[in-house]
Amino acid sequence: MFVDIAQISVKAGKGGNGSVAFRREKYVPMGGPAGGNGGDGGSIILVADEGLRTLMDFRYKRHYQAENGEDGRGKKQFGSDGKDLVLRVPTGTLVKDEETGIVMADLKDHNQRYVVAKGGYGGKGNAKFATSIRRTPRFAEPGVKGESRDIILELKLIADVGLIGFPNVGKSTILASITSAKPKIANYHFTTLKPNLGVVSIGEGHSYAMADIPGLIEGASEGAGLGLEFLRHVERTKLLLHVIDASGQEDRDPVDDFYKINEELKEYSQKLSEKKQIIVLNKLDLPQAQENLERIRKEFSDYEIIEVSAATGEGLDALKKKAYERLLQIEEEIEFVDETQVENFLDRKERDTIVVSKEDDYYLAEGDFLERLVGSTNFDDFESFSNFQKVLVDKGVIKRLRDLGATEGDLINVCGIEFDFVD
C-alpha cells in the first residue's frame, strides 16, 4: 500500500530528577551533600532511508515516546540517560508542525537526521547547589519535561522529471518505454493509483529519475479524483513533461486539456505553475492526431514540443535526450524549509514563558519554568525557600506582581503553591 502522508504524535523523554542525599559514612560524621544529577531524557529522531517507499508504518502506530532519564542517586551517582527513539522515513519526507503548518525539516538525503522532539535535561542533585555559604542544601532540581508535538509527515516523491497530464494520455506507457519501471497499464482512467518512479539512462554516468504523477484532472486542486493526494509529488520535480493526447480521443480537446491541467497546478501552488514544461504530443500514430497537429503547434508555439508515439517508440529517444539537456539548465529544486521561520517557531516553543495575571484580588504566576522551580523547592527548608524567593526576584515575577497592584498580604498563587505577598 502506498501511503504518502501521516499524522503522528511524538513525545521525548523527561529528564530524571536530581537526588537529595548526604554522605553517611563511618568516620565522616558531618558528611556533605551527595545527591547525583538525573539523566537526560531520550530524544525522538527522524532518519531518512532511501530503502523505504511509503509512510505505511505510521498508519498503524501514531504515538511515539522516548525513554525517560533515570533519577539521580546518592553518593553523587548520576542517573542514566534515556535512549533516543529513531524513526526511519523515506527520503523526500517533509516534517510539518501540525498546529502551525510550518515545515520544520526536509529529509531529502539518505541518512539525513532531524531531532523532532528533544529530550528534557536531567535535574541537578543537591550536591550541585552547595556553596561556601549554603553547605547542606536540602533541595534538588526536578528533570525537565521532554518536548512533545503533533507532526505531519508528508512524502514528496524525489524525481528530476515529472510526467503530468489527464488520465489515459499515455504517461505510464512512456515511463515504461524509457525506464525500467513497470507501471500498470490499461485503457481506462486511473490505472495508476500511485506514483511510479523509474531511471532514465542517457549513457555511462548520465541518468535522471522520472516519475509518472497520476490523478491530475479538472478540479484536482479542490480534491477531485486523486488530485490532492498526488499534486504534492509534482513540487519536488525540476522539469515537467506535459503529456497530451494529440488524437483527442474520448471527445477531448488537446488544447483545452493543456490549459485545464496548468490551471490546476496554479490553483494548488504558484511555484508549480512556474516550473519548466516540455509539451509531449503522444499518440502520433493515430490518424486523428495528424488532423490536430497543425492547430496544436500553432497554439503552443512558445513552448518546446516533442512529438512521440509511445505505442511505436517513435520520438522517445529524442524525448529522453531533450529532457536531460533541459535538466542541466535548471537550478536546484525549490527549498521547502524557511530557516528563519523555523528558528522563530522553535524559539517560541522552547523559551521559558512566565505568565503573571490578576483575577479579582487573586494573583497568579504560571509557566513551565515556574513549575520546575516549584518542583525543585523544599518549602520546609529555609535555604531552599530563600532560593525560591531569589529566583522570583531575578526573573522579574515580584516586579510584575507589584505592577499589577499586589501589596503586602495579598494572596499569590505560583503554580498551585499559595503564599502571602511580601514586598
Image: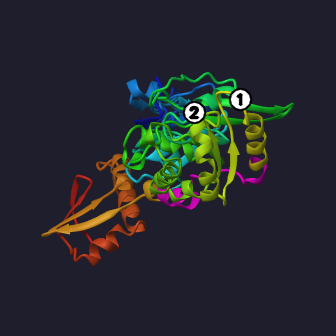
The answer to which image quadrant residue 404 occupies is bottom left
- Name the amino acid type tagged 2: Gly
| Magenta stretch encompasses residue 416 | no
Q: CA distance from mark 1 to mark 2?
A: 12 Å
The answer to which image quadrant residue 310 occupies is top right
Which residues lie in the magenta part?
Answer: 327-347
Quarter of the picture containing the C terminus is bottom left
* Mark number, residue 157: none
Along the line of sight, which residue is nearer the eye, 165 or 347? 165
- Name the amino acid type tagged 1: Gly
Tell me where residue 280 appears, x and y as whole percent. 64, 43
- Residue bearing mark 2: 170
| Magenta stretch encompasses residue 341 | yes
Label 2 SS: loop
Q: Residue furthest right?
A: 204
Along the line of sight, which residue is nearer the eye, 48 or 315? 315
Q: Residues within 10 Å of mark 2 (few under 14, many from 20)?
A: many
Residue at coordinates 59% horizontally, 54% vertically from top-left?
295
- Residue bearing mark 1: 313
The answer to which image quadrant residue 281 occupies is top right
Residue at coordinates 59% horizontally, 41% vertically from top-left?
289
Residue at coordinates 66% horizontally, 36% vertically from top-left?
210
- 93 lies left or right of 331: left
